Image (spheres, grey):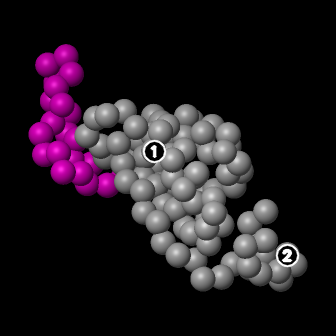
């Protein structure tokens, strides 16, 4: 099993969620987070400079079986990209075990 963690623009959340549902990812957790990026300059809008050092993003946590990881990653990559700095990151790590609390079942079948 793989844990896929993605940090995306809040404005892209709905599109990413739909892309994940389209490939069969029907359960994941998410949080609103604030981070610091590499961009140090502020943006000017109508003559007012806004700080971009604190960046509002959405953090997704998804656990899938190994054979489903690439499909999930591609769905996020294609739906979250704008081509601009700050589109986000995806992190992938191994999950050793998974348990369904209700039944006590374990392993990849608990993800279905």
Q: Residue at x 30, y 43 (%)?
A: 86
Q: Quadrant of residue 101?
A: bottom right
Residue 34 location, x and y as percent?
36, 53
Reply above or below: 77 against 97. above
Q: Residue at x 67, y 51 (%)?
A: 25
Residue 10 location, x and y as percent?
45, 40
Instruction: Classify residue 52 as left or right of residue 103.
Output: left
- Does label 2 or label 1 sit earlier along the sequence? 1
Residue 66 visible, this angle: yes
Using the image, tell me which numbered label, if any, was put on residue 59. none
Using the image, tell me which numbered label, if any, was put on residue 77. 1
Q: Secondary structure at mark 1?
A: helix
Which portion, as a residue range, is magenta? 31-54
- Does 62 appear in magenta? no
Q: Secondary structure at mark 2?
A: loop
Residue 33 visible, this angle: no
Q: Quadrant of the C terminus?
A: bottom right
Residue behind mark 2: 102
Q: Residue at x 17, y 45 (%)?
A: 39
Q: Residue at x 60, y 83 (%)?
A: 96
């Amino acid at each position: 099993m793989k844990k896929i963690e993605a940090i995306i623009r809040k404005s892209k959340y709905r599109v990413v969620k739909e892309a994940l549902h389209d490939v069969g990812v029907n359960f994941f957790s998410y949080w609103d987070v604030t981070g610091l990026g590499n961009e140090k300059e502020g943006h000017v809008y109508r003559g007012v400079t806004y700080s971009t050092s604190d960046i509002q993003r959405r953090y997704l946590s998804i656990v899938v079986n190994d054979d489903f990881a690439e499909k999930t990653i591609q769905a996020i990559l294609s739906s979250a990209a704008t081509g601009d700095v700050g589109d986000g990151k995806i992190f992938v790590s191994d999950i050793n075990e998974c348990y369904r609390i209700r039944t006590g079942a374990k392993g990849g079948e608990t993800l279905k």
